[in-house]
Every structure is written in C-alpha cells, then in structure tokens.
Amino acid sequence: MDIFKYKNVLLIDDSYIDNLINRKILDNCNYAESITVIDTPNEAFKLIKDSLQTGAVLPEVIFLDLRMPLMNGFEFLKALLELPDLEPGKIKIYVLTSSLDPKDIKKVKENPLVSKFIGKPLTKQILQEI
C-alpha cells in the first residue's frame, strides 16, 4: 500500500508491547495518516463522546482489544451503542484480540458496531484483507 487508506485510526489496548507492534505495522503499511494509541477504553470512550459533542473528527477505524482491566472491550462497545449521536457504520471497529473464546467470538459477531473479529497479531496481510 503506498497511499494512506484512512485519515484517523484509534488503537485501544492496555498492552504497551501490542500497541508498539500494531502501530509499527500500521505505519509500515501507510494505513492511516494519524494513529492514536489509547491504553484504556474509558479514555477512548471519552475521546469519542467529546468528538461527537464538539464536532471534532472521529476515528474512521478502531482496533479494539477485549481483555482489559476496569472497562473491557465489550463494555466499551455497549457504551458506544448508548451514544445517541453515533450512527452505526460511522466508525469501522475491528476487535483485535488474543481471546479465542467461542463465547467472545459469538458476542463480537452479534454486535452491530463490529466489522470483524481479528486474532492477534495484526499483520500486513490482515490489513490488506480488510
């Protein structure tokens, strides 16, 4: 990929190493002009909520981990569904997780906000497929 596919991408994961690797892959593939890394879903939710209220630019794509302390990925998705100004499909959300729990996969597939379930690690091939 030689041109940026998206303007803004948000990575939400509590793992510093995963964020470092995923950001590097996104950078190397020129996937986005701007990549924001946030290590807590609470902070990411606040960013999206504030963006909706102020008219600021929303991320076009979110890569979301499921297993995080305080607020997990499912709780983040539930909170997003409750935002009245967030239209489904406005943000592409890819669950990027090491969880292979069939219950998690089923819940992800049933969520109207999620575009795809991706098992870690993120790769150039996965980015090309999505």
Image (spheres, grey):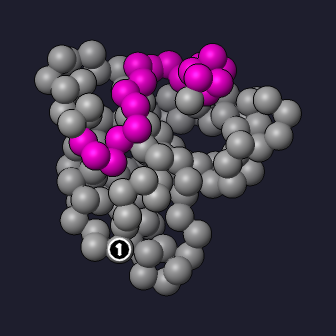
Residue type marked 1: Asp
- Between 39 and 45, the one nearer to me in the picture: 45
- Between 12 and 116, the one nearer to me in the picture: 116
Which quadrant holds residue 3? Answer: top right
User: Is 63 situated left or right of 69 in this image?
Assistant: right
Farthest bottom residue in view: 54
Q: Residue at x 61, y 27 (%)?
A: 127
Q: Is residue 102 visible in the rendered structure shown here?
A: yes
Mark 1 — residue?
85
| Span highlighted in magenta in the image | 111-129
- Between 24 and 113, the one nearer to me in the picture: 113
Farthest right residue in view: 2
Q: Residue at x 44, y 67 (%)?
A: 47
Q: Is residue 114 magenta?
A: yes
Q: Residue at x 50, y 29 (%)?
A: 18
Residue 62 higher or lower than 120, as above or below: below
Quadrant into which the C terminus falls: top right
Residue 90 higher or lower than 61, as above or below: below
Q: Is residue 14 visible in the rendered structure shown here?
A: no
Q: Is residue 57 magenta?
A: no
Tag count? 1
Residue 29, horizontal then vertical, whole percent? 74, 30
Residue 118, horizontal then vertical, whole percent? 42, 24
Mark 1: few/some/many CA within 10 Å (<14, 14-19, 20+) = few
Residue 97, horizontal then vertical, whole percent? 37, 26
Residue 95 higher or lower than 69, as above or below: above
Residue 72, horizontal then vertical, whole percent? 24, 43
User: Is 30 situated left or right of 114 in this image?
Assistant: right
User: Is 27 situated left or right of 91 in this image?
Assistant: right
